[in-house]
Amino acid sequence: MRHPTSKTQALQKFRSALLPFRAGVIPVFQLGEVDCGFVIWHRAAKYGEDIESQLSQALAAYFEFLEELVAAGYRDLIVTGATLPTIRDGAFDGEVAHLRRSVTATMAERTALTLDYNARLAAGCAARGLAFIDIGALVRDPATGFVADAMRHPNPLDHHLHPERAGRLWANELLRVLDLPGRV
């Protein structure tokens, strides 16, 4: 919502796609990975603020947008937890890792921030009566606390989760929240 060099103008695109209210549409938001993996760290360094302040600002902006959609008529929207980081410490191969090289936070710090972000996002959604889903616990290796190797993308240069394995987890959570039968 507050990317420092947004070329995509994502917030405006979201508004254009969803406003005015569209009956029968259930928006699903999967935001926050860029916040936790880059923007919060970048803005804290750039503006000389602490991570806590930037985290609070990021969540406030997110909830402000979600509340705008609820006020417009969207009662059934779904918010997902941010994807846990997959870029390992010192890894600069791949386009996204290369772009994020200015962030010096360790994978442990980025993972802790993402878990905190998701916990606050879940609490904020619960307080607003919004559906929230998160697969973080399902993709983590309990021994390391990081994304399990089996859940990483098969291409080591791709920072996304494994498309089929993570996709099944997200699909099953969506089916559960929507109270639809079946499992993927």
Image (cartoon, grey):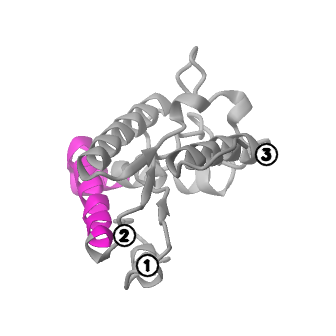
Residue that appears at 33% across and 71% down: 69
Residue that carries the numbered disc 1 in the rendered image: 18
Q: Residue 155 carries which label?
A: 3
Q: Do the residues labelled 3 and 1 touch (CB within 8 Å)?
A: no
Helix, strand or loop under label 2:
loop
The N terminus - image quarter: bottom left
Which amino acid, mark 1?
Leu
Residue that appears at 41% across and 71% down: 5
Residue 119 at x, y percent in the picture: 34, 37
Q: Is residue 163 positioned above or below 31 on the image?
A: above
Task: Measure how far apart labels 3 and 1 are at the Cα level.
Answer: 34 Å
Residue 168 at x, y percent in the picture: 70, 43
Task: Measure how far apart labels 3 and 2 are at the Cα level.
Answer: 37 Å
Within the image, what quadrant is residue 143 found in?
top right
Q: Is residue 47 positioned above or below 154 on the image?
A: below
The magenta segment: 42-70
Residue 56 magenta-highlighted? yes
Side of 167 relative to 49 (left or right) = right
Marks 3 and 2: which is nearer the front? 2
Of the pair 142 and 6, the residue shown nearer to us: 142
Residue that appears at 62% across and 40% down: 91
Residue that carries the numbered disc 2 in the rendered image: 74
Q: Do the residues labelled 2 and 1 touch (CB within 8 Å)?
A: yes
Which amino acid, mark 3?
Asn
